[in-house]
Image: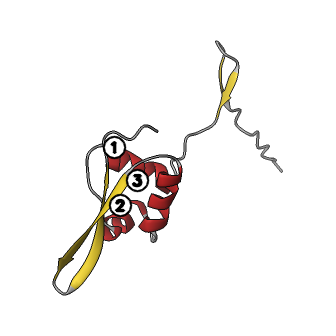
Amino acid sequence: MNQLTLIPAAPSIDSARAVVRKPVILSQCNHILAHLRAGHTLTPAEAYERFGSLALHSRVAELRERGYNVTCTIRTGNGHRWGEYQLVRDSAA
């Protein structure tokens, strides 16, 4: 009977600086920040559709804690209200 031996993959190493590099997995916050930095606005429905975020207001609060100036404009239509978030360009973070 043949046995299969599994050998874990070694992490990639940057030999010039001897730093172990882990795969980059962007968090919802980072996805949202990248979207806003690109000059786009974002609504809760768009955040759910694009990034799977059910609580955009919470992610925006985290970005504000990190020093980003994110504004919210209340929009209305078809009997509904929602917030539209935008990054103010002079954010220092």
Give the residue number, with chain letter if any, for mark 3. 32
Identify which amino acid the numbered label 1 is placed on.
Arg
Q: What element carries label 1?
A: helix
Circle 3 — which element? helix
Q: Which amino acid does label 3 sit on?
A: Ile
User: Looking at the image, which residue is at 77% across and 46% down?
Assistant: 4
Residue in view at x 37 percent, y 54 percent: 70
Residue ID at (33%, 39%): 90
Quadrant in the picture for residue 15: top right
Q: Which of marks 1 and 3 is nearer the N terminus?
A: 3
Please rate how many residues cluster around mark 3, counting C-alpha atoms within 10 Å: few if below 14, some from 14 to 19, many from 20.
Answer: many
State the SS at label 2.
helix
User: Looking at the picture, which amino acid does disc 2 mark?
Assistant: Arg
Q: Is residue 21 above or below residue 14?
A: below
Give the percent coordinates (x, y) of residue 85. Answer: 32, 60
User: Mark 3–mark 2 contact, CB under 8 Å?
Assistant: no
Foreground residue, 59 or 72? Answer: 72
Residue at position x 16%, y 84% from top? Answer: 78
Which mark's residue is nearer the viewer, 2 or 1?
Answer: 1
Q: Name the residue under label 1.
A: 37
Q: Which mark is residue 50?
A: 2
On the image, the x and y values in percent for residue 25 come to 54, 46
